[in-house]
């Protein structure tokens, strides 16, 4: 009985979202997002709903605060400004982010692939923990950590996608200034 009730409630919710999107699909948006690489959202008039299928996500080159090779998709808000944001990072195999910290709590969910994370001031592969799809972490402000994408076996050659959300502005502070891509010429 609980399962039937759950299925019925889920169906009603999905039909309600679909109806809201269908009702407003012919209206044009009056304002455009200024957030970098904003993904396609629900039509105008359905501003209370932001829903994306994987095909709706628009990727672009990540900001120069991250090492080259990453791509970003902003789903909500503007991570570089005050206020809530949700963004995704697509990271290629063998991608590394040197030891760093953030000014605010970083909420990370692994959507696809695998990411290895270590804590501390020195990049040490042997001390890293592996997190696969479905994993979540909340990293407190000022906590020094580093990451690496290492997709072996069945995931070899595939990108890892992580989703970050929190309160902006999102900032990254490298432990060693020489690791900061913004300092490289």
Image (tube, rainbow, N blue to C red):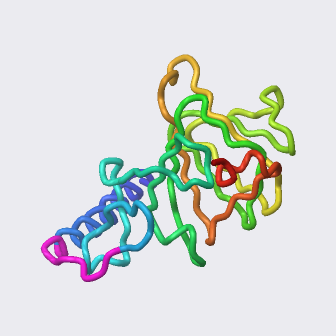
In the rendered view, tell whether residue 153 sits above or below residue 91.
above
Which residue is the extreme one toward the top? 153
Question: Is 41 or 61 nearer to us in this picture?
Answer: 61
Residue found 36% across the figure and 72% down from its top: 49
Which residue is the extreme one toward the right? 121
Q: Which residues are magenta?
A: 23-32
In the rendered view, tell whether residue 77 sits above or below residue 88.
below
Give the percent coordinates (x, y) of residue 115: 63, 36
Residue found 65% across the figure and 58% down from its top: 107
Give the side of residue 23 with respect to residue 81, left or right: left
In the rendered view, tell whether residue 71 sits above or below residue 29.
above
Residue 170 shown in magenta: no
Give the percent coordinates (x, y) of residue 161: 51, 43
Give the side of residue 118 with respect to residue 84, left or right: right
Instruction: Please tell me how many numbered marks the rendered image carries.
Output: 0
Question: Is 92 or 63 nearer to us in this picture?
Answer: 63
Give the side of residue 87 with respect to residue 45, left or right: right
Give the percent coordinates (x, y) of residue 31: 30, 81
Give the percent coordinates (x, y) of residue 109: 59, 49
Residue found 26% across the figure and 80% down from its top: 45
Residue found 63% across the figure and 48% down from its top: 185
Secondary structure character of the magenta stretch overall:
loop
Question: Is 126 or 50 nearer to us in this picture?
Answer: 126
């Amino acid at each position: 009985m609980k399962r039937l009730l759950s299925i019925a409630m889920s169906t009603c919710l999905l039909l309600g979202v679909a109806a809201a999107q269908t009702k407003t699909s012919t209206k044009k948006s009056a304002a455009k997002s200024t957030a970098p690489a904003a993904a396609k959202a629900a039509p105008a008039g359905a501003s209370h709903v932001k829903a994306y299928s994987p095909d709706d996500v628009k990727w672009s080159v990540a900001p120069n605060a991250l090492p080259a090779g990453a791509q970003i998709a902003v789903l909500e808000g503007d991570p570089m400004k005050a206020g809530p944001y949700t963004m995704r990072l697509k990271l290629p195999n063998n991608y590394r982010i040197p030891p760093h910290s953030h000014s605010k709590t970083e909420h990370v969910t692994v959507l696809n692939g695998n990411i290895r994370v270590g804590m501390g001031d020195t990049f040490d592969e042997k001390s890293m923990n592996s997190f696969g799809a479905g994993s979540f972490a909340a990293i407190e402000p000022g906590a020094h950590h580093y990451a690496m994408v290492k997709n072996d076996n069945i995931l070899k050659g595939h990108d890892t996608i992580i989703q970050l959300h929190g309160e902006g502005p999102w900032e990254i502070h490298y432990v060693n200034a020489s690791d900061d891509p913004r300092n490289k010429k």
